[in-house]
Amino acid sequence: MKKRIAKSALMVITVCAITSCSSTKSLYSWYDYEDATYQYSKKTTPELYTKMMEEYVKIGSKQKGTRKTVPPGLNAEYGFQLCKEGKREEGMKYLQKEIETYPESKTYISRIIKQIEKP
């Protein structure tokens, strides 16, 4: 009887160990976002800005994560950058899209929108 319990316990431990080692798919696909934004923050050159903006577009259009949606804050970041670039109308669409996708961001994003709308 003790051997049977010991074998069962060993089997349960083995199964738990094997399943805990399996990789889980990420909620979002971030591609090269971290490196692109870091490089741009270190050295703000037009080339690095373009690379960062391309990453925003790539992440927004090619989501392979389990949620199949843009990560939180990405539409807001992209929209804000577009507004700074002078593409205010397009940028505002992305800021609104952030609120639609993540309603909990409304308070924060609304403040950004108000600041952008000031003359």
Image: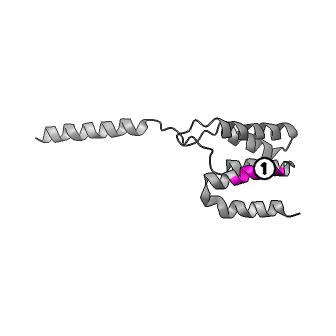
Under circle 1, the secondary element is helix
The front one of 44 and 26 is: 26
- Tell whether 27 sits left or right of 74: left
Split into 4 quadrants, where in the image is the C terminus?
bottom right
Tell me the residue at 70%/59% (across/down): 109
Q: Give the main secondary structure of the magenta stretch.
A: helix
The front one of 65 and 68 is: 68
Residue 36 position (above or below residue 115): above
Looking at this rendering, what residue extends furthest in the left direction?
1
- Tell whether 43 sits left or right of 96: right
Tell me the residue at 58%/35% (across/down): 64
Q: Quadrant of residue 18?
A: top left
- Judging from the image, the colouring scheme is one colour
Tag 1: amino acid: Gly
x and y, in percent, of residue 35 in the image: 71, 40
Tell me the residue at 52%/40% (across/down): 66
Indicate yes or no whether the magenta region holds residue 47. Answer: no
Split into 4 quadrants, where in the image is the N terminus?
top left
Tell me the residue at 63%/44% (across/down): 70
Q: Which residues are magenta?
A: 88-96
Indicate yes or no whether the magenta region holds residue 90. Answer: yes
Instruction: Look at mark 1 in the image and give the residue it sits on.
Output: 91
Residue 81 seen anywhere in this rendered image of the structure: no
x and y, in percent, of residue 85 in the image: 86, 48
- Tell whether 1 sits left or right of 112: left
x and y, in percent, of residue 101 in the image: 62, 51
